[in-house]
Image: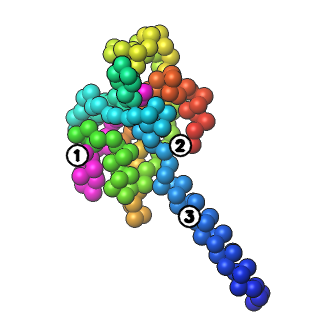
Amino acid sequence: MIYMPFCCQFRHLIVICALALVCACASQTEFLNSDRIERRFGSYGVEVLWADDAQRISNLYSNEADGRICRTFAVVRFELPLDTRIEVEHSQVVAGASIGQVFRGAGWRIDKTSLEFGTARAADFPDLPMMMRIQPTTVLATYEYRFDVIRDGLRIPYATITEFYHPDYLSLTELQAMPH
């Protein structure tokens, strides 16, 4: 056994604990889309435009002096049949709560699996140019991913989400450079 003075042992312990804390915090404080919108624009809200048992379409917006601006248009296709262990969280989501905030607040870790990065024209969705206050010909960055939740070694597939981003919020290059 190698002898190490107590003060060195203590320093090593502090370094190991600090590294563990950083790793734990990194996985728990990963920024959600709602967090990013609020940080960048100073406010965040979610408006459910349409929902049923299989799908939810929503406007993730910031509040500006002259009203709301859609920062992310989200199409969520729920994994069916719904796992009964997340019924409470799911009912909050369908009622209009932020998906990531609901699951994070309930102690779930969120895991996103990237499926596709791409682009779409705002005009492909009739009300989107008005909601985003952009020209119909504007090209939007898009991101499709699987959204699973994890807790106590249990992984539950929840949804496949496709998001369309306002050009002042995220470009395709910025989106691809972000950790997912």
Q: Quadrant of the N terminus?
A: bottom right
* Magenta-drawn segment: 70-92
* Distance between mark 3 and mark 2 Cα atoms: 21 Å
Residue closer to the observer: 41 or 170 = 41
Judged from the image, the secondary structure of the residue bearing numbered disc 2 is loop
Q: Earlier in the sequence, mark 2 or mark 1?
A: 1
Instruction: Tell me the residue at 37%/58% (across/down).
Output: 107
Q: Residue at x 58, y 60 (%)?
A: 22
Image position of 23 with respect to 121: above or below: below
Q: Residues within 10 Å of mark 1 (few under 14, many from 20)?
A: few
Give the numbered dot on residue 180: 2
Read off the residue under disc 3: 21
> Residue at (43%, 50%) from the top-left corner?
110
Alpha carbon separation for disc pair 1 and 3: 33 Å
The nearer-to-camera label among 1 and 3 is: 3
Q: Amino acid at mark 3?
A: Leu
Q: Find residue 148 and report its horizontal and vertical position in percent.
A: 40, 49
Which x, y percent locates residue 99? 34, 43
Q: Is residue 135 visible?
A: yes
Q: Which residue is mark 1?
A: 91
Callout 1 amino acid = Ser
Q: How would you rate the neighbour count of disc 3 (Cα within 10 Å): few for under 14, some for 14-19, many for 20 or more?
A: few
Left or right relative to 105: residue 42? right
Pick whichever of labels 1 and 3 is earlier in the sequence: 3
Residue furthest out toward the front:
65
Q: Is residue 45 left or right of residue 35?
A: left
* Badge 1 element: helix
Where residue 4 sits, quadrant-wise, is: bottom right
Look at label 2 and name its amino acid. Answer: His
Residue 54: x and y, percent?
A: 26, 37
Tag 2 or tag 3, which sits nearer the N-term?
3
Q: Is residue 120 above or below residue 82?
A: above
